[in-house]
C-alpha cells in the first residue's frame, strides 16, 4: 500500500488473473448463447446441455455462474437492455432539446431491426414486461419524457403511462419490421416518431422537422 500526495491510502486493485479471465469468458459465452436462443427462436425452454453446447463450454461450468436457466435468461435480457441503452446514449448524449432526444431514441430503436437485429428481436420477444419495470430502459425513457414535459416541449400528464404507450408502439413497429423485411425501417421509424410527437402536443410542422433531422449511425456492438 502507498500514500498519495493528498495523504490517502492507495489500495492496489485486483488484477484479473488467468482463472478470472477464463471465468469471465465462460460467463460471457453462456449469456451470448442465451441471447441467440432468445433472438433466433424466442425460446427459453432449452436444456442446460443445449445451452452449454451452444456456448462451447463444459456442462459442469454452468452452475459455477448461474443457479438456474431463469437466472441466465434474466442476465441475457438485462445485458440486451444495457446494450440498447448504451447505444442510444452514445448517439443522443450531445443533443440538447429533450424533444429531439426522445424522437431520436424512437427513430434509432426502430432502425435496430436492420442494424442490430439480435437486440431488436430480443426486445420484441421479451420487452413487454419491461415497459413498467424499475430497471432497464423504462427509467431512461421516463427521464427523457419528464425532461421534455418539464421544459414544455411535450404535453405529458403521466410519464409512466406515456412510457407504456411509447414502448408498446415501438415493440409493434419492431415486430412489423421483422415480419416485413421489404419495409423501409428508417421511414417507418421516422413516421412513428412523428406520430408520437404529435400525440404529445407538438405541431405538425415542428414534429415533421424533428422526426426527419439527420441521424448518426449507431455503433456496432
Image (cartoon, rainbow, N blue to C red):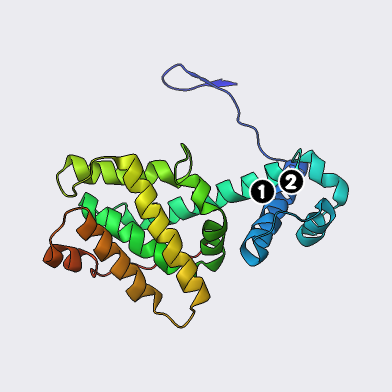
The spot of residue 30 in percent (x, y) is 72, 52
The spot of residue 145 in percent (x, y) is 28, 46
Image: 20 above or below 122: above
Look at the image and tell me in which quarter the N terminus lies: top right
In contact (CB < 8 Å): disc 1 and disc 2: yes
Q: Residue furthest top?
A: 7
Q: Which residue is mark 2?
A: 69
Quadrant of the rendered image containing residue 199: bottom left
Does residue 29 appear to the left or right of 164 in the view shown?
Answer: right
Q: Residue at x 87, y 46 (%)?
A: 60
Q: Residue furthest bottom?
A: 182
Q: Residue at x 60, y 28 (%)?
A: 12
Which is more toward the observer, 135 or 62? 135
Quadrant of the rendered image containing residue 49: bottom right
Does residue 162 appear to the left or right of 55 in the view shown?
Answer: left
Q: Could you classify mark 2 by the number of other residues whose Cα lies within 10 Å: few (under 14), some (14-19), or many (20 or more)?
A: some
Q: Which residue is mark 1?
A: 73
- Secondary structure under the numbered disc 2 in the rendered image: helix
Image: 182 above or below 49: below
The spot of residue 83 in percent (x, y) is 50, 53
Residue 218 in view (yes/no): no
Q: Which numbered disc covers residue 86?
A: none
Amino acid at each position: 500500500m502507498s500514500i498519495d500526495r493528498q495523504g490517502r491510502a492507495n489500495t492496489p486493485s485486483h488484477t484479473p488473473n488467468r482463472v478470472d479471465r477464463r471465468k469471465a469468458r465462460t460467463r460471457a459465452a453462456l449469456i451470448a448463447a442465451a441471447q441467440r436462443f432468445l433472438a433466433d427462436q424466442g425460446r427459453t425452454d432449452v436444456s442446460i446441455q443445449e445451452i452449454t453446447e451452444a456456448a462451447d463450454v463444459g456442462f459442469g461450468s454452468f452452475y459455477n455462474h448461474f443457479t438456474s436457466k431463469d437466472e441466465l435468461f434474466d442476465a441475457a435480457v438485462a445485458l440486451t437492455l444495457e446494450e440498447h441503452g448504451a447505444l442510444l446514449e452514445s448517439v443522443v448524449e450531445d443533443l440538447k432539446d429533450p424533444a429531439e432526444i426522445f424522437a431520436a431514441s424512437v427513430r434509432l430503436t426502430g432502425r435496430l431491426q436492420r442494424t442490430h437485429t439480435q437486440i431488436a428481436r430480443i426486445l420484441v420477444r421479451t420487452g413487454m414486461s419491461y415497459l413498467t419495470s424499475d430497471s432497464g430502459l423504462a427509467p431512461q425513457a421516463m427521464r427523457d419524457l419528464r425532461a421534455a414535459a418539464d421544459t414544455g416541449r411535450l404535453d405529458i400528464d403521466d410519464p409512466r403511462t406515456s412510457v407504456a404507450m411509447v414502448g408498446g408502439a415501438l415493440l409493434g413497429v419492431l415486430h412489423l419490421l421483422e415480419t416485413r423485411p421489404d419495409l423501409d425501417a428508417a421511414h417507418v421509424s421516422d413516421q412513428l416518431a412523428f406520430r408520437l410527437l404529435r400525440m404529445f402536443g407538438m405541431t405538425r410542422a415542428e414534429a415533421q422537422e424533428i422526426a426527419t433531422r439527420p441521424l448518426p449511425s449507431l455503433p456496432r456492438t
